[in-house]
Image (cartoon, helix red, strand yellow):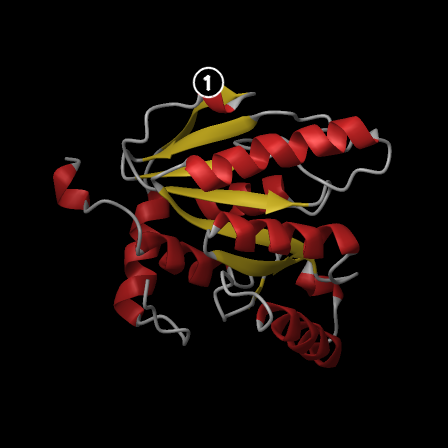
Amino acid sequence: MQEQAGVLTEAELETGRKLFAGPCDFFFGAQTTEQLPPPDRAEIAFAGRSNVGKSSIINALTGRRGLARASSEPGRTKQLNFFNLGGRLSLVDMPGYGFAKASKAVKEDWQRTMFAYLRGRPNLARVVLLIDGRVGPKASDKEVCDLLDKAAVVFQIVLTKCDALSAAALEARVKEVEAIVAKHAAAFPRVVPTSSTTSLGIAELRGMMGRFAAPASSHP
C-alpha cells in the first residue's frame, strides 16, 4: 500500500475520532489459528512485549478503561483477543512476548502460532508493534520485526509510556527506532510516540486506523 508517511489530514483525524467514538466490544478469543473468526472485515493487530502497555493503549484509543485487561502475571495471556469496532474494523490484542519466565518451548510455540496468524490472515491490514519508549527496543522486539518482514505484513512501531521522557530524550528515542525501521522492508516509516496517560499520539493512531475501516454508511 502506497501511503504518505507524513502527518494525517484534519479529515483523517476526524474520521478516526468518529470511528473510535462508536461502540467497541470484545467478541472472540482464539488460542489457535483454527479457532479464528471469519475474516469479514479489516483487522489491526497489536503486538508487543509483556507489560509494554498494550491494554492501556487499546483502552485509551477506545475510551473504555476496562475493555482490554492487563494480566498481573506477564505472559499469562495466550490467546488472540478480538474487539469489534462498530462493525467497521476489528482490533486484535496479541499475546505479549519476551516474558522472562517462559520456557523456550513456550516461546517457540508463540512464534509458530503468531507467525501462522500473521502470514495467513487475509484481512490483516496492519500490525501496531508497541515498544516501551522508556527502555527502547530489546532483542525480542528486533526478532519480531524480522518475523513481520518474513510474514510480509506491514507494521508500524508505536512507542508507549513516552510521558516519562523529556523532549530531548524522546527525540533521541524516535531517531533510534527510525534507524531500525529503515532496515525492515515491511515497516511503515513513521514512528508514533504515545502515552495512554496524556493521550499523546492517540488521535494520530485513531486517524491511521480509520484509513482501513469500512465506510460508516455501510453500517447504519
Quadrant for the N terminus in the image: bottom left
User: Callout 1, which amino acid?
Assistant: Gln
Residue 64, image x and y in percent? 49, 37
Q: Residue at x 30, y 63 (%)?
A: 12
Quadrant for the C terminus in the image: top left
Does the rendering let one see residue 145? yes
Q: Which residue is mark 1?
A: 35
Residue at the right extreme? Answer: 101
Image quadrant where residue 198 sits: bottom right
Residue 3 in the image: above or below residue 156: below
Residue 175, image x and y in percent? 66, 78
Residue at the top extreme? Answer: 35
Residue 41 in the image: above or below residue 21: above
Image quadrant where residue 74 sits: top right
Residue 141, image x and y in percent? 70, 53
Residue at the front extreme? Answer: 150
Residue 177, image x and y in percent? 66, 70
Residue 197 in the image: above or below residue 36: below
Residue at the bottom extreme? Answer: 168
How many discs appear?
1
**Residue 127 placement, left or right of 15:** right
Q: Residue at x 19, y 44 (%)?
A: 216
Image quadrant where residue 32 sits: top right
> Which SS class for mark 1?
helix
93 or 9, which lies in front? Answer: 93
Does the rendering let one see residue 64? no
Q: Residue at x 46, y 19 (%)?
A: 34
How many C-alpha atoms fall within 10 Å of the one at disc 1: few (<14), some, or many (≥20)?
few
Q: Residue at x 70, y 74 (%)?
A: 176
